[in-house]
Amino acid sequence: MSSARVIGDVVLDVRNISLSFGGVKALTDISFDVREHEIRAIIGPNGAGKSSMLNCINGVYQPQHGSITFRGRTFQHMNSRQVAEMGIARTFQNLALFKGMNVIDNLMSGRNLKMKSNLFAQAFRLPGAQREEMAHRAFVERIIDFLEIQAYRKTPVGRLPYGLQKRVDLGRALAMEPQVLLLDEPMAGMNVEEKQDMCRFVLDVNDEFGTTIVLIEHDMGVVMDISDRVVVLDYGKKIGDGAPDDVRRNPEVINAYLGTVH
């Protein structure tokens, strides 16, 4: 990890979140915080409520109880667009890319919130709209260079290997210039080499862009290597929270993963 990176104050504060679907409790009284510039991992067995937690943070789900505060602003009923406008971006476990569009156009879709020109100005390519589009394209080209996907700029995303599609998904989220980036299993389904690449990019995003990262990941080796702090969920409840080494030694966490306390 870069020594230049300084962990700051709390930017995201999750308090007493409970979420139910019908009679099924997905999350029960979950609280944790995220500090500026840190990599904060959320781990737990399948069905622990990890993705549900991210969905609450980025406005896909509305929890029945609790609150989420981002940079001093508390929101209880916000949709995904409003959360994105506040500065929180998200990648998805199942890729939500536009498969028929090329890499540049997929990344440009991430600039949508930043565009000031209206559809009329864009359609008739008025000078102001053209200047704005050129500026957005220049920003997207920097992300393409950063993610080392220059050779695929004009390739339809659906034709790319899975590992590169995940990289494009990360790039589209970065195009939103988020202050906090939510990554939902960014390394799922990858081979060892692809995982190493993605780890490097996550660390570089955190270091070079200064982006705060909240990460769901099943690969414990990855989590322990790159996270500053880890929160552990099991059956929708929090069973551990702290530095990676502390969490690794927590008997409740060991029990949840292995079914037996060592």
Image (cartoon, grey):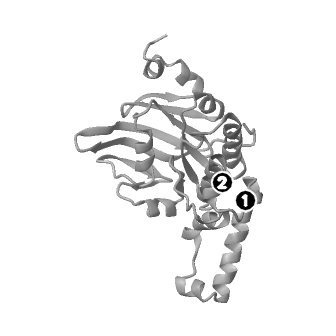
Circles 1 and 2, Cβ within 8 Å, touching? The answer is yes
Horizontally, residue 169 falls left or right of residue 139, namely left
Query: Which quadrant of the figure has residue 215?
Result: top right
Can residue 30 be seen here? The reply is yes
Place of residue 94 in the rendered image (x, y in percent of width and height, measured from the top left): 50, 49
Q: Residue at x 58, y 67 (%)?
A: 109
Residue 2 in picture, x, y percent from top left: 74, 39
Q: Nearer the viewer, residue 14 or 56?
A: 56
Secondary structure, mark 2, is loop
Q: Which residue is pictured at 47% across the width and 18% down the height?
A: 258
Q: Nearer the viewer, residue 106 or 49?
A: 106
The residue labelled by disc 2 is: 160
Q: Check disc 2: other Cα within 10 Å, few if <14, some if 14-19, many if 20+.
A: some
Picture quadrant where residue 139 is located: bottom right
Task: Please determine whether, in this image, residue 210 is positioned above or below residue 262.
Answer: below
Element type at marker 1?
helix
Which residue in the structure is indicated by mark 1? 152
The spot of residue 159 in percent (x, y) is 64, 56
